[in-house]
Image (spheres, helix red, strand yellow):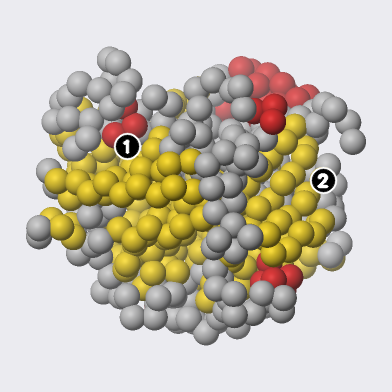
Amino acid sequence: MSSSLSPLLSATFWEDGYDHLVEPVHQRDAQARRHLAALDVSVFDGNGKRLLDFTVDPRDEVVDLDGLLAGPLAGRGRVLVLFDARYDPQIFPYRPHHYGYLHRRGSPAPPLYYAVNAVLGGVPDRIGATGMNNFETYLFRQQALPARHAVLVANLSRFTTAEVQVTAYYGRSKVLERATLPPKLHAELPLPAEREGQPLERVEIKAPFRMATYVIGRQGQSGDLVLFDHLFTYFR
Amino acid sequence: MTPPETAGYGTAVSSRLRTLARQILGVERTPTYYLPWLTRPGLDCVLILSNIESRFKAGFNEGPFRLTTTQYDADGHRVGRYDTTLAESTDVAELPLTPAPPGYGFATVEGERLHTDLYVTLTTPEFYTATHGRGEFVERYPRRARAAMALARGALAPLGRTLPAFVRYQYVYERADSRSHLLLMNLSNVENGVRVSAEWSGRRLASRLVPIPPMGTRLLDVTTLTGRIPVARLKLEANAWFNLYVVGAGPRDLAGPLSLMHVK
């Protein structure tokens, strides 16, 4: 493998019962010749225990996560799926991005197309990067919403435990939650819909280095995912 | 704020050619933040406006911030203009958009010292979802360039072709209980011929030329190109700057809850 290759570390979460597809490269050329140099996938349970490792042919256009995981991981609940890719920056003038498609089978909810969260930290040649983007925000409509919201946070580092602060804002009050995440551990932190009569307005995540994060919304009755979005990073 | 990412849509050579062509035609690019909008009976489309990303940025974090939102309908007509003032960078304002027929288009948001991503939300009594807009630009072609572009488009359109000045790719998926649509947005002041062609496993499925008026939008049902095959790769070519959002639909298709997704 060429030493000029750049690393790309990304993560998503798989749950049983969902069609879940991931495009290793979103913006293809006409013949889909442009591809990653390598793509390894690892799967971890909620305790950070490694469950599976496999290699994806980087020429594959679409990875059927559910097809790969539903059999061996039936009944496991939600797992963290880590994509460890390498790409040639001469082929990709901008950093490639994985995209995904998510839909619970049989659900009346619409499918969700989403950008797989890329985590630059945790890859050796990025650790010294300045302007670490480890402070993220997401806004909500300021009314009672027909969904239960939460943040999914995972620590993809190899060696370092992280303390993650999740602050939810309700009008002039806020609620701070802390989670300690050893490497490869993940957590779903619920965001109460209201506090003292004020609706959830915004959430912020702070961490010592970049976590894999999503804001999720589950439909009130079924629990089906109706929101699976990245937060917005700011350089502080 | 999401930066414009155009470098990946062609080789360095074609990028230089486009730059040269823009200079010859006198095309101006106005930095513009835009978001799609989509309304249906029972489906509310509300923008979340803020300048929250600026709250740590000196010179950008002291209000008030005055924002102007312009809503364009599917044919590029202005159907709404809304002024909003945010007292502080952490203030948030919600802007419900007018459900102008046929129920989709895009909106632009302007504001001095506005430096943040803005959200577009879709809400029904049972579902809520959201995505964000894009900070890119709108292309303005001078009169002579518009005439030249119309000539070129007129020559190619009968062949089902367009001048492929810009190219994007998008994967789309179909399942028994889900559908996908594209919101195609013409981000220019010339008529834009967007040619959408679908293929999978080396097999060409179908193609269609979608003419879009200046600042207009079209909603394309992907199954009209792909049938109901589970996955297809779309190639989109256009004679002027454009972008797209993917609209996800459940088993009730456009009559049910919908999702929106930005595309890089």
Q: Secondary structure at mark 1?
A: strand
Give the quadrant of residue B159: bottom right
Give whichever of A159, B179 is nearer the camera: A159
Q: Residue at x 62, y 40 (%)?
A: A159
Residue assigned mark 1: B109
Q: Position of residue A161 (x, y in %)?
A: 52, 42
Q: Residues within 10 Å of mark 1 (few under 14, many from 20)?
A: many
Residue type beneath disc 1: Val
Horizontal arrangement in the rendering, residue B155 relative to residue A58 (left or right): left
Horizontal arrangement in the rendering, residue A52 relative to residue A45 (left or right): right
Give whichever of B162, B242 is nearer the camera: B242
Horizontal arrangement in the rendering, residue A218 relative to residue A173 (left or right): right
CA gap between label 2 and label 1 equals 40 Å
Residue assigned mark 2: A38
Q: Secondary structure at mark 2?
A: strand
Does residue B101 appear in this view? Answer: no
Q: Position of residue B1 (x, y in %)?
A: 43, 33
Does residue A194 appear in this view? Answer: yes
User: Looking at the image, how many numbered discs can be counted on the residues?
Assistant: 2
Q: Is residue A169 above or below residue A72?
A: above
User: The N terminus of chain A lies in which quarter of the figure?
Assistant: top right
Q: Residue at x 51, y 64 (%)?
A: A112
Q: Residue at x 71, y 56 (%)?
A: A42
Q: Residue furthest top?
A: B59
Q: Position of residue A6 (x, y in %)?
A: 75, 32
The chain holding disc 2 is: A
Residue type beneath disc 2: Ala
